[in-house]
Amino acid sequence: MSATLNTFHYDGSSDFRKFEHFIAQNSTMKCFVDDHVEPFDYQVRGTCIGGWLVLEPWITPSMFYQFLGGNEGSTAMDMYSFCSVLGPVEGNKQLRRHWEAWVTEEIIAELALVGKVNSLRLPVGDWMYIPYGPYINCTDGALEYVDKLLDWALKYNLTVLLDIHGIKDSQNGFDNSGQTSGFEWTSLLNDWPIGLVTFEHWPVRSAKWMGKFDRYTGEYTSINYGNIRHALDVVEAVVLTHKNHPAVLGLEPLNEPWEKTPIDHLKRFYWEAYLIVKEHAPLWKYVIHDSFRLDTNIWGGFMEGCPDRALDTHIYQAWNIPASQATFYNYACQAKSAIANMEQAFGPVIVGEWSLATDNCAMWLNGFNDNLPGYPMLPCKHVRCPDPYMGPDQPGTPIDPAKPIQGPFGTGMSGPSYGMCPVSRDWTAENSDGMNWILAPPEAPEGYDATDDVMKNLALKKINTFSVIGHGFYFWNFRTELPEPQWSYMLAVQKGWIPSGPSLNIDEIATACEKEDNGQYKCIAKRGMLSSNVINGIRSCVSRDPSVEPQGTNVTQYEDLDDEDLATVADDVFNDFWTKHRLEGVTCDFGGVAQLMELNYTYVPRFVAPISKGWTIKHPIAFGISAFIIIVLLFVVFGFYMMRRGGELREQTLRKLGAIRNSFARFSYARLGDATNMQK
């Protein structure tokens, strides 16, 4: 595993290669620059054009309804099998209809003029530039639509980051790579019910692009240099094809290589792809994905001194354990620390994918007719499956409202049933202890829907995190076929969740994470949890940081504590540990037995001047006014209490004197009891 790629040579003798404004050293993968190099000072506010040139069933399910009820030979669940099952003629016919309808000039104009984005991230497949296998003739014409998008972007003053999203033999095993790898049909193992068609994806996930992976040792046993060479050839083809278009911002050579990819080989690939880009398109930006490892020990110093490069990290909350609003807010804001550390250790960081989803309910999010084991963790809403966006000629549409969920079946359950499709849950207004989410129904009762407030707050906090510290973001995705504003930038803007103003320099973004940044929350134990789980949570904290153990309390004594005393100990341990380590990425969960609660005090926000002016101050007038209002309210409450207490004393006196008859008292208390029963 120590061998390097060594596929990109210049003259065979020199370790250095001179470019116009910098010198690259091949052995160290570092650069030496001169004074003419401009820094990566471009901050993006953008969205991804996903599900268009690289199909993903959850984004455009109408393209895959035709495969419901299919078997091993007639079911497609990604781009590769779509072309394999349909063949080049029918596949290309359907793809062209899809390409024409899914992205239009009107949509790009709306993103620019209403959504106020300044950049688009465009996923493309390697097969579009060097066709192979079932893609030959099936994806003909795809590059024509890339050109259309680039022209529209130029017209509306947008840049485009070209993102090689799908690569030969899959870099991550996901359907978004073009080919779901590690996939196995398991139908032969099932004799009942008759005709049941089943498969496994998630339990056997792998990625073959880099080589042969041993699922038992968790390591690659060989490296496929032919695949890596193919990927570098694709990088060169992309650059040569689009290098002269002024709308192109740059290139991301590989989307989401999975976390088990050998890091030395991945870095060498990134390095050699960078040199290819800089040789042919010296002004392009170059963005590399962190391979799900946002770790300064891995990326700190990599490609040091090389101009125009940035690191892409993807931050989602859709796969988080269900929790309170405060927990999701804090998680969104605390990513700021990791981004800041990486900006210092590596350089510019872009959050290339994020969404507002806080659940796994979006239909087929984890694969066609499949789901991760254990997901979704809470019940999902259902809506009527919409008619196909590309018109009534699409096979398999509309969904038959007379049929229940159909196979083939994966290890999880997700799909249309009786014409209804699952979508994200509502957020219900929380009670005083923030625990409503545990028993809340998927659709909030009338008058208790807090989704708009929660989503807007979450969006502001995420934008604060990604733009105030980092170099911006691309929202995933620009639209979805099902009504999923948590995943659709256009719908989120329409709902007012994402600000549509021309600038990010607004007060509500600048102050969005103020309470979270200042630690104005407490991590406490949930009441009503199993004592054994609470003890395990405490032990986990103490084992990682012994200083958080309460003085005089020994871990072995926890089993002797009653529930409330145990919860009190856990409050101290959880909060101490979380406070000390939250900036390292620790969340207030500890096995599902802890949650965040906002401190019980009146919070006075500071006055913040526009960011563009470069200064902020605390506003004493705002503090004084707030304090005055609080004092007045206290006087009002106290006065009301005294009046009520005086009335009660007067009534007691009258009763003693016989002024209130017993018959009247019984009548009053009877009515009070009826009202109490009605409230219950």
Image (cartoon, helix red, strand yellow):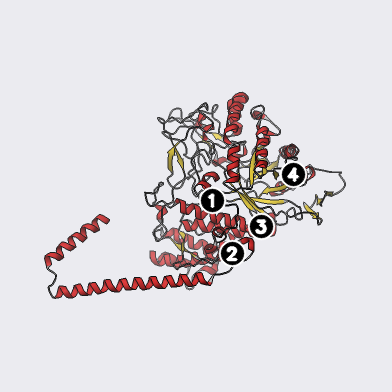
Crowding at mark 3 (Cα within 10 Å: few <14, some 14-19, many 20+): many
**Residue under the image location 23 percent in, 72 percent down:** 648
- Residue 222, quarter of the rendered image: top right
- Cα separation between marks 1 and 2: 21 Å
Dot 2 falls on a residue whose secondary structure is: loop
The answer to which of 190 and 261 lies nearer the viewer is 261
- Cα separation between marks 4 and 2: 43 Å
Pick whichever of labels 4 and 2 is earlier in the sequence. 4
User: Disc number at residue 609?
Assistant: 2
Q: Return the x and y of residue 553 as percentages of the image width and height.
A: 47, 70
Dot 4 falls on a residue whose secondary structure is: helix
> CB of mark 1 within 8 Å of CB of mark 3?
no
- Cα separation between marks 3 and 4: 22 Å
According to the image, label 1 marks what residue?
498
* Quadrant where the C terminus is found in the figure: bottom left
Pick whichever of labels 3 and 4 is earlier in the sequence. 4
